[in-house]
Image (spheres, helix red, strand yellow):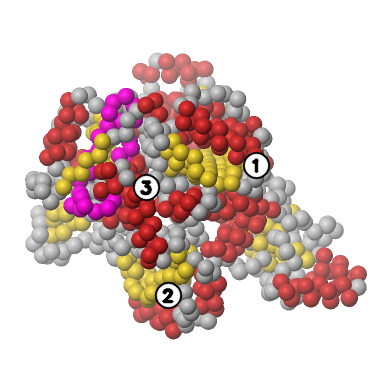
Amino acid sequence: MPERHASSEAAVSTSNRDNEAGPAARRSTAERVRVLLPLPLPAALDYRAPEDRAPPEPGSFVRVPLGARSLIGVVWDGDGEPAELAPDRLKRVVEILPLPALEPTLRRFVDRVAKYTMTPPGAVLRMAMSVAEALQPPRRRRLCAISPAGLAALGEPAGLTPARRRVLETLAERPPATAAEAARSAGCGTGVVRDLVASGLIDERFAAADPPPPLDWCSPGPPLSADQSLAAGRLVAAVEAGGFSVTLLDGVTGSGKTETYFAAIAAALAAGRQVLVLLPEIALGAQWLQRFRDRFGAAPAQWHSEIGQGERCRTWRAVAAGRARVVVGARSALFLPFAELGLIVVDEEHDPSYKQEDGVCYQARDMAVLRASLAGLPIVLVSATPSLETVVNVARGRYRRVGLPRRHAEAALPEVRLVDLRRERIEPGRFLSPPLVAALAETFAAGEQALLFLNRRGYAPLTLCRACGHRFQCPNCSAWLVEHRFTRRLLCHHCGHGEAVPPLCPECMTAGTLVPCGPGVERLLEEVSARFPSARAALMVSDMLTGPRAAAELAQAMTDRHYDLLIGTQIVAKGHHFPMLTLVGVVDADLGLVGGDLRAAERTYQLLHQVGGRAGRAEHKGRVLIQTFMPDQPVMRALAAGGRDRFLEAEAAARRGAGLPPFGRLAALIVSAADAEAADFASRALARAAPQMPGVAVLGPAPAPLAILRGRHRRRFLVKAGREVHVQAVVGDWLSRVRLGGSARLQIDIDPYSFL
């Protein structure tokens, strides 16, 4: 097995010795190639260059042996440390792959992300090489396209089953696709597609990957308001000027932020550059994608968990070759190998889903700023409720701010009213207060639409036995099982464990004693259906939507007024525009304020403000009713008064006084083990070696709020430090003095967002 390098200082002295040793030694050194593999290894490994070939350039993709395996890695930069093996004892690079090299900016980005997150660089590289098939020679693809007979059949749909019609509609709206892709988009099995091929309604052919459709950046798009035109001009100027800059596009909900930053995208395309747009819920961004098609004449390349492996492979290659000019994606799109990146846009920059909690723990918004800085290009952060970190960076002069203070087309902001649940009498087993019920009745009577928001999936968050008090808990996690009545299952939302709702209590074996406690969205639907039997209601919940097409169809059905009421979790807050939606009811506004999270108040304000912003976005005035047991809480007062800036000032003052981010530094260390004793043993070893230095406090160890997760016992440390402290160096020195053994694992989370 090849050996890895040690320190760069030693590498300099080794290089000097090689120069003194003569031409043969220098040739041996020149043959040495450093290769970073997509594995959690601490450094690149040494290999010899291929026989009778010049050493591959940094960034080249190469195939190398590792033990009994053959792996693909990337030739990495730098001389590294002195080798422990002579060059003639190193294994040779097997093959240099005919792929575009990983460009220097991305290689520096991988190194910087690894250092910041305290993660092995190979683990970060794995995110940039996430599609193994893309590194192999492309295979011929069998593509399906709708035939003339299929188009004729769509005109006379009486003879088509619903599944066949969906497949034909899908292929009529998009370029040729594989049978699997067409079936996935249509929400059916591949057998339906094969039957349509056999009947002549679909043509099938072999073809190489088609180039992405061209984007028309010259199209003027819809007319912009005066505010939008001014903001768009400043964004375009940043793109045309080039160089690194960060601009916050701060606009109220419904102000037309998307169309405004489309102008910057057009400017980047006109300059021959690629664009990356990050969205927090790309699989649910159907309306965003339609706006993009309307503006640029074709869809962008997409990158998220819902697309198939074949499409991911083609997109990765197209991005690396520069053929994909605009990519819209989730946080992982940040690691795509762009050839000519010229602009990054982070929409809804405040959204907590940009924080990755597993594997490499990183904040995609912050790492997007880092990538823009390394590449020397502009980045636009977009939000109606910007994060406190971004607001503070604007105040410090590090970021620019462009504002959109008014809604588009003169639409008014909704009226917000707090419903004090301490004073309202709600019927037992019901969860909607009389004011909210009355508002729903008025809305339905006026022929308008409403939205009920509750950030809790399923029917009830807890099921217990009223005879013996037994509570259904996940066997793998310290969490209650959530009842999902539509599927008659009890599910753990942390590890995915599921079981059927039993007919008897498993503890006392009594029948008919299991009762749900508290509401979920399914229970709200049951209550609304009982109160308003003629109202057409639908649920918008991530685990009930089978993919992007289902989300798009539901959003379109709401726009077309096939529903009077939408009930949903946090995904309803993100970017949806329903012209006839005039009432938003927040069922449990206090839900996000529990748990001791330092960002709980900020996140609650952001989420409820965004949800309320769905109301009254067209000519009909909107209103928002917020049910709360804490109407005097600062978050609730700020929502009712529209006092975002005052709330952020108070939040900043509280964080500054406590030395918390963005005025201080945090790092979380989570110890996990297969049993509690091993977790405690490892935690005690870490505690004994904890740093004792000015400006640094180590809190813990303590059982994590989720003390058992996926069968592993968890203990947490929290490192709290001043902004001037290099917290990674402190943690690195601490961990260098401790050796964890047995089943214990350690996860490091720099700038933690979750405290579970």
Towards the viewer: 576 or 519? 576
Secondary structure category for the residue under label 3: helix
- Looking at the image, do the residues carrying marks 3 and 2 touch, with CB atoms under 8 Å apart? no
Q: Is residue 605 left or right of 213 when viewed as pictured?
A: left
Q: Is residue 457 above or below residue 67?
A: above
Confirm whether the magenta stretch covers residue 630. yes
Mark 3: which amino acid? Asp
Whichever of labels 3 and 2 marks the residue nearer the N terminus, that label is 3
Confirm whether the magenta stretch covers residue 52. no
Q: Which mark is residue 749?
A: none
Residue with the mark numbered 1: 242
Towards the viewer: 716 or 622? 622
Mark 1: which amino acid? Gly
Q: CA distance from mark 3 to mark 2?
A: 31 Å
Q: Going 84% across and 76% down the picture, which residue do you hit? A: 17
Which range of residues does the magenta coloring cover? 611-636
Q: Which mark is residue 697?
A: 2
Q: Going 15% across and 31% down the picture, which residue do you hit? A: 441
Mark 2: which amino acid? Ala
Towards the viewer: 597 or 249? 249
Q: Going 21% across and 56% down the picture, which residue do you hit? A: 462
Which image quadrant: the C terminus? bottom left
